[in-house]
Image (cartoon, grey):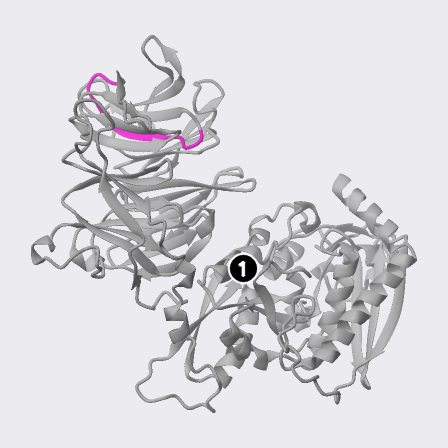
Amino acid sequence: MAASLPWRRAASFEREPVREPGGPGAGRPFALPPGITVCDAGGGSLVFGDKEGQIWLSPRSLQFSSFQAYKLRVTHLYQLKKHSILVSVGEDEEGINPLVKVWNLEKRDGGSPLCTRIFPAIPGNKPTVVSCLTVHENLNFMAIGFADGSVLLTEGDITQDRHTTTQILHEGSYPVTGLAFRHLGKITHLFVVTTENILSYLLSVKDYPRLELDTRGCGLRCSALSDPSQDLQFIVAGNECVYLYQPDGRGPCFPFEGQKLIVHWYLGYLIIVSKDRKSSPQSECSGSDPQNSDKQILNVCDLHNKVIVYSSVFDDVMDVLAEWGSLYVLTKDGKIHVFQKKDTQPKLEALDLEKSVAMENLTPRNGQEENGLKKQVIRVGTRKSQLARIQTDSVVEMLRKRYLHLHFEIVAMSTTGDKILDTALSKIGEKSLFTKELENALERNEVDLVVHSLKDLPTSLPPGFTIGAICKRENPHDAVIFHPKHNGKTLNNLPEKSVVGTSSLRRAAQLKRRFPQLEFRDIRGNLNTRLKKLDEKEDFSAIILAAAGLRRMGWENRIGQGALAVEVRAKDQDILDMVSVLNDEETVLCCIAERAFMRHLEGGCSVPVAVNTMLKDAQLYLTGAVYSLDGSDSLKDTMQTAINYSQQNEEGANDDTQYVGITATNVPPHAQEAAENLGVELASLLLSKGAKRILSVARQLNDAQ
């Protein structure tokens, strides 16, 4: 649920000291070598550096080995998780002269690992103290942060001197306190956090464009990158809250007071080491001895369910490491403590108390709010584009008018489709381009419902989700917007070879069939971006957009998405009941028929399929068509079915049955079933006439282009 709810508590982990594995000291608490100053883990080893310049390696058996890496001291270590490559920073001579060394732990040079590369870590030939270090798991990027606010970026094979480039990526006034690479698909970002701000750099395009995400920062070791279970978000722990970031903006935040010392991500859990007791709600694990009030508290946090699954007091934590499926806490007295999940602990998904409390009393109350009762928070997910926000605002406003006792909070985020703008939608080859990130947030209970343009939702939803409401459809037609120099013209009288932009294969195929003298090219971006490309450049003579989207943006004078869908968790009956008031019966039936038609044809962004519906005089009319990519070959037909609203539900009928992913409890099930059958029957008719051949060729040609 919402981040404003209090943290719950559990005891899901067990803590015990690591003991000597064998020999004379077997059974005694294990002790680290003296003088350890820095550590890391990965590749099947715990790795330590000391103030004498040695690097120590420990396999799971805790049989330590060491080698002399520097003449003076080791200051930073980064062990790759999936490679036997270790990167270190240290000093061979007095003064500020940091040296980076790259080690291949599988190869030997005498008795030591092979050092494959050495270079000075000096930004702009001005010696300064290294503050942090990170390496891309693909070994093609390395970033080094400095106390003077600089970030040095190395691109290429970081294990070799040849074929790499090193440059100053970032210069600022505040010390760099954390770095993290985020890699998704073909897109790589670098997060940079300082004491005063947070930035992201896009490394997959030329000139590395940057974006400032926030004007707050954090201390050293107080940031981490989550795993895919938390959507690879950059986590920054301030003294009052823990903040989560995507490369294009801030996501949810979680109140968590206390001076943070260490933040670490471990198998879906956030580990926080804080300085004072305010940072940890009292738990059965932390005790209540007042003499512990100034000691360090380690909390293991489940952000998905907002539960602190373990709390424990330590005297002086050096670092937190994760390897071999376990969590290790190192203290400055040289001891190691291991944390493991209890085998008998029930899954946290069963801890649903907060949800049951938050979802009480969701039925409309005619505008009356109970005295003294704090409004419950309903979080609504949406994309970040201006049109998406306008559409979501309209849905939220309808809900607010009906449920005056609830507070609705909008959570905006970017999706894969928003981030990949240089490739046609039909070429990306991934479903749920504009919905996956929103559905991930819905699954993690970070939002309670999501507003989509219905056209963005695949006809088969992931398990556990349903469309709980479809709002009244606006104008479903397409609109032609002309370049200012062609005002007053039509597509028919544009000069030959004029270029028309569209992101839809269906639109392009239909227009190629009608206007073979024109050229059609893909155009990506939100409405603002596409209109700017049209008006400010000479690339396009016209573009095709959705009329509904233009109207919602207030741009009717330049003449979309016709229907808006609200996606929810399928088993969240309270939210389903709440959003059902948004259903427009006619639009629901039309959309069920259309989605059934599309699903039976396996239509989507990669093939040109068109469909249109009309409900008139209790008859539902469905027209569907398929096209070749150039529009020269096509099939089109129309079917109809009767919709009987007066028919009563059978006794005991299930009102929650999904029809092509839609759960509309206030629309007669027999009417929904008739609409779905109509879509399937029309698709079957076109398939019998040769639609499969047309679509198969279209897919092959689209993939080959």
Q: In the displayed structure, would residue 608 be above or below residue 315?
A: below
The residue indicated by pointer 1 is 439
**Image location of residue 253, percent across then percent down:** 36, 60
Q: In which quarter of the image is residue 17?
A: top left
Q: In this view, does 190 lie to the left or right of 666?
A: left
Residue at (57% x, 54% y) in the render:
418
Which one is in front, 153 or 32?
Answer: 32
Q: Is residue 78 within the magenta segment?
A: yes
Q: In the displayed structure, would residue 512 be above or below residue 40?
A: below
Residue at (31% x, 33% y) in the render:
40
**Image location of residue 405, percent across then percent down:** 41, 83
**Image location of residue 188, percent across then percent down:** 49, 40
**Image location of residue 543, percent across then percent down:** 72, 58
Residue at (82% x, 86% y) in the render:
617
Which one is in front, 442 or 125?
Answer: 442
Q: Is residue 339 within the magenta segment?
A: no
Stretch of the chain drawn in magenta: 70-82
Amino acid type, label 1: Glu
Q: Is residue 561 left or right of residue 598?
A: left
Q: In this view, does 385 lie to the left or right of 694?
A: left
Q: In this view, does 324 lie to the left or right of 570?
A: left
